[in-house]
Amino acid sequence: MIRIFALAGLSLLFGCSAFAQDATTDTRPGIAPDIREDETRLKVQHGNFVVVPIPISNPTLEEGLVAGAAYFYPQSEEEEKLQPASVTAAAGLYTNNDSRTLALVQQNYWKNNKWRFTGVVGGADLRLSLLAPEESIAGTSVDWRINGKFLFAKIARRIKGNWYGGVLTRLVDASQSIESDLTGFEFDTGSDITSVQSYSAAYRSFHSLIDSVVLAWEIQGCNRGGTAPLWDACTVKLRGFSATDYLGRVSGSGQIEARWQLSERWGMVSFAGAGYVGSSFNGIREREAIPSYGAGVRFTVLKAKRINLRLDYARSTDSDAVHISVG
């Protein structure tokens, strides 16, 4: 997904296809954990049909709710041992800044998990805000609206062990409007644009220090080429500010997080990191260090799948933010 749409679209995908981030029952890449067997008030379930509400809060989309519904296809005992259940899901997102997204998701596994397919189709109407460029009315915010449709499809085949190879396609048909005469020299801010070149890379690592403490770190990079629309800009993927504060053709970030498991359900985290943005839309903190640091609380709502309700408070140079999510 395009990064701005991903803020909404991936929330839907995690919400309706059973929270793909923190699985421990099956750690193979690409597996969506089956949440039917967990006893929790987080979900409403009837047989193979599950409904899950997920609260969200962040400085980009503000406060809102993701409501997802999923149907898990029945399996034989032999199939349950060898591959996850296929699932069809739908979800909708709405936040108090009047942003909304709707998505349909299909995940299939077959031939003893040799083949995997994931497809997502949906639409989004996002109401965001931008910081004005330094050359104009610096420090002020302007309204930015993105409206469009997106499609993602990926099919992969096991090569060896947990290694898979495959092909994917991503299509976005979107228009945007900015309620000002602002012009970003590095981006096309017109209403209809085609994005041509997009590159990104990320690496994450996790280290168990003692039984109750895990140290995690990650580095990420992004580059945009060609006639890039503003909604396809690189962002600084850290906490403490809106994703739309730092939009550029190039960005990078690194962060480290310590995680303490205090009890069976409760945990704490602390984190710190820094990023940068180049060829930016507004020129703010161009190629300067952008810090991010803070702490948070975790409450496990689905123990078997390590699904946590996450509350983080983060600070940066000129801002702070509270982040609430499930993952």
Image (cartoon, grey):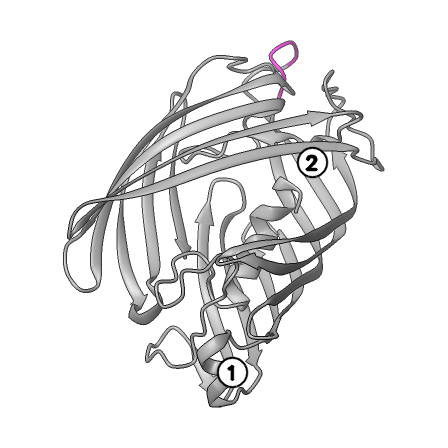
Label 2 SS = helix
Q: Where is residue 95 in the image (x, y as percent from the top left)?
A: 55, 54
Q: Give the label on residue 79, or none.
A: 1
Q: Nearer the viewer, mark 1 or mark 2?
A: 1
Contact, CB < 8 Å: mark 1 with mark 2?
no
Label 1 SS = helix
* Between discs 1 and 2, the one toward the N terminus: 1
Q: Which region of the structure is painted magenta?
A: 132-136
Q: How dense is the environment of label 2, judged by Cα within 10 Å: few (below 14), some, or many (20 and up)?
A: many
Identify the amino acid type marked 1. Glu
Whether residue 128 appears in magenta in the rendering, the answer is no
Q: Name the residue under label 2.
A: 231
Taking 189 as reference, is 204 left or right? left
Tell me the distance, in whole angstroms, between the alpha carbons under discs 1 and 2. 42 Å
Q: Which of 283 and 75 is in front in this view?
A: 75
Identify the amino acid type marked 2. Trp
> Please, is residue 10 above or below residue 199 in the view?
below
What residue is rendered at 77% in x and 28% in y? 189
Magenta portion: prevailing SS class: loop
Picture quadrant where residue 241 is located: top left
Taking 180 as reference, is 275 left or right? left
What residue is rendered at 36% in x and 40% in y? 205
Q: Where is residue 93 in the image (x, y as percent from the top left)?
A: 58, 60
Taking 258 as reference, is 126 left or right? right
Q: Position of residue 316 (x, y in %)?
A: 38, 26
